[in-house]
Image (cartoon, grey):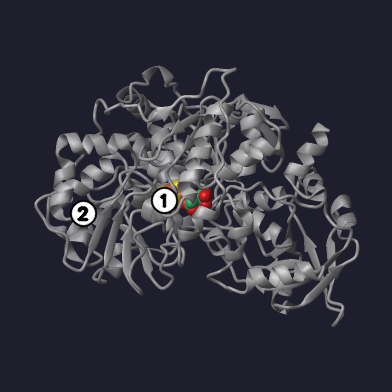
Amino acid sequence: MGKNIVEKILEAHLLKGRCVPGEEIEIRVDQTLIHDATGTMAMLEFEALGLETIKPRPSVVYVDHNTQQIGFENSDDHIYLQSAAQRFGAIYSRAGNGICHQVHLERFGIPGTVLLGADSHTPTAGGLGQLGIGAGGLDVAVAMGIGSYRLQCPRVYLVRLSGRLAPWSAAKDVVLKLLSILSTRGNVGVVLEYGGEGVKSLSVPERATIANMGAEMGVTSSIFPSDENTLRFLKAQGRESQWRELFADQDARYDRIIELDLSEVEPMVALPHSPGNVRRIEEVEGLEVDQVCIGSCTNSSYKDLMTAAAILKGRTVHPRVSLAVAPGSRQVLLMLAENGALSDLVRAGARIKECACTFCIGNELSPKSGGVSVRTSNRNFEGRSGTKDAKVFLTSVEAAASAAITGKLTDPRRLGIPYPHIQEPDAYLVDDSMFILPRPEGERGELVKGPNIGEPPKNEPMPESLGAEVVIKLGDNITTDHITPAGQRLKYRSNIAKYSEFVFENVDATFSRRCLENKRRGLHNLIVAGFSYGQGSSREHAAICPMYLGVKAVIAKSFERIHASNLVNFGIVPLIFEDQGAYDKITTGQKLLCRDFRESIEAGKTVVLEDPGTGFVLKCTYELSETQREILLEGGLLNWIRRRKA
Ligand code: MIC
Ligand code: SF4
């Protein structure tokens, strides 16, 4: 039986286990990436584990998220990261160099290798035929130290592309179309592999856009073959020697096949407040728009911004609209500056932001109250923009630029101008001067830590029994943005006590206080939720802060992959309702006891909780490997590793 691309890469990297879907495997990690929102904690954890040298090379530390620098905290984090990169052996990508995923694609990604990143959009690398996997900071810290990562061997779906995109339909529309098929949940443990004739018509940056938003479907990764287009891209980046061909065998097996004819893909839009809430733009055209933001790791490549510039050239942004453009990398910005496209954008009235995540993480450019914002990014969760009642619509660059001109949500086909066919250049402008290379072995510098930088919090081993209160009952699709908001709170990522004050602040601002009160009284805390708890980002803070607040378990109808691992890493048990109907019988404030909590997890048995007031019995299961159960018993991965080292 032939092999698909995912099997080929996993088998070539397999260290432990068997490549059988659902089984736990350990794979070699070739490269890692972290950034200034996840990386400070990851480096602190690396230190706390007593690790000294980063094994995967290159490992890159990017400064791209927290570039606001209001107050000293962000700058202190940057300097700490620079000193840690130098000391432990990572490349440091300085602020202004660009968004990790875009820059990594341009300068570091290698087909057929494995990249582990402390960011959920690490699978962007799949555009290049690299298997990019997003994980929590602690998992990446461990991978930096030992060069490997444990995961559940995935199932592989083939997305077979045929035809080619019509003018005004873009790669973003392809992935939005797929989101309308696969939705944002129910895809845990799946990798999407792209194939078919249609692949040939897509450039590497277009493929990267598609791979990027696999994260919104909750898949483990997305990957394209490495073919002549991949070679052309690497050659244009001056990295031709790193190319290798990578295809699935003719008779490769897949768990599911999804057929998609590119020529039938129309301009799409994701409506508030979910990337899965997809329509054809035609259906919602005409809605007045207040803001347009072009950029993010989904759509900020050379072609993306050249397309925006070509559409805006000689026109002026509509009076109602504020247009912001954040280039994905310094390479993209420099090329636009040199070929004059930057002037076209500026003349049209675009506000040029720095090469960073900026608006995407709610760090700036929050829309007006109740405002309508059209964005080329990947997430439109409620409140993520920084304005709780804003309505964020996700589109292609083509549609976003059209909205900037007309002031309305517009099907770009109706703009009435010829489609600007932008070609990828034969040579990108390569300037690596903003990377700082690690010091030679033996010349280790000092770590520099500002006053906001704490230590990773410690946790106790799992208690024998659970005596808990349900502190919050939530619905379906709770995102990590709900749990630990980013935006203006990002600067507390390396100060857990402070960051914990803001857990669920946009859902129930009393959450943190109530948790701490229970903790003081010796009561454990429980979170109850519906389907797909922990959607979205890889931020492990959505587990660390609840751990700090005394949360011992989350009971949900289902969990998303990265968040479930993060909960385990910090000693919080992800419990699943055995009978989903029981969810309706739980109320906030309810007390639930389990006398043999520890023993149940240790033995792999159902966890049975009881309400002492009413006698109501709740049975919970879990999907945990033996190692994960051991980690939980120790109170988290840091304790587990320390114990094993001892
Ligand atoms: C995001 O898009 O939500 C982030 C910010 O990039 C996160 C990482 C983080 O929260 O630090 C992600 O996607 O993992
Ligand atoms: Fe940055 Fe947004 Fe991409 Fe996250 S999704 S890495 S915040 S650009």
Q: Which residue is mark 2?
A: 350
Mark 1, residues whose alpha carbon is within 10 Å: few (<14), some, or many (≥20)?
few
| Three-letter code for the amino acid on which mark 1 is drawn | Gln
Query: Cα distance, mark 2 to mark 1?
Result: 23 Å
Residue at 70% over, 57% down:
547
Residue found at the far front of this picture = 451
Residue 80 in percent (x, y) is at 53, 39
Check contact, mark 2 vs mark 1: CB within 8 A: no
Q: Position of residue 102 (x, y in %)?
A: 39, 39
Q: Residue drawn at (50%, 53%), measured in percent from left and top?
A: 491
Q: Position of residue 576 (x, y in %)?
A: 73, 62
Most foreground residue, 186 or 590: 590
19 relative to 590 in the view: left or right: left
Secondary-structure class at tag 1? loop
Residue nearer the viewer, 42 or 598:
42
Q: Amino acid at mark 2?
A: Ala
Q: Pointer 1: what residue?
A: 69
The quadrant the C terminus occupies is: top right
> In the displayed structure, would residue 272 be above or below residue 394?
below
Q: Is residue 552 left or right of residue 450?
A: right
Classify the position of the N terminus by image quarter: top right
Judged from the image, the secondary structure of the residue bearing numbered disc 2 is: loop
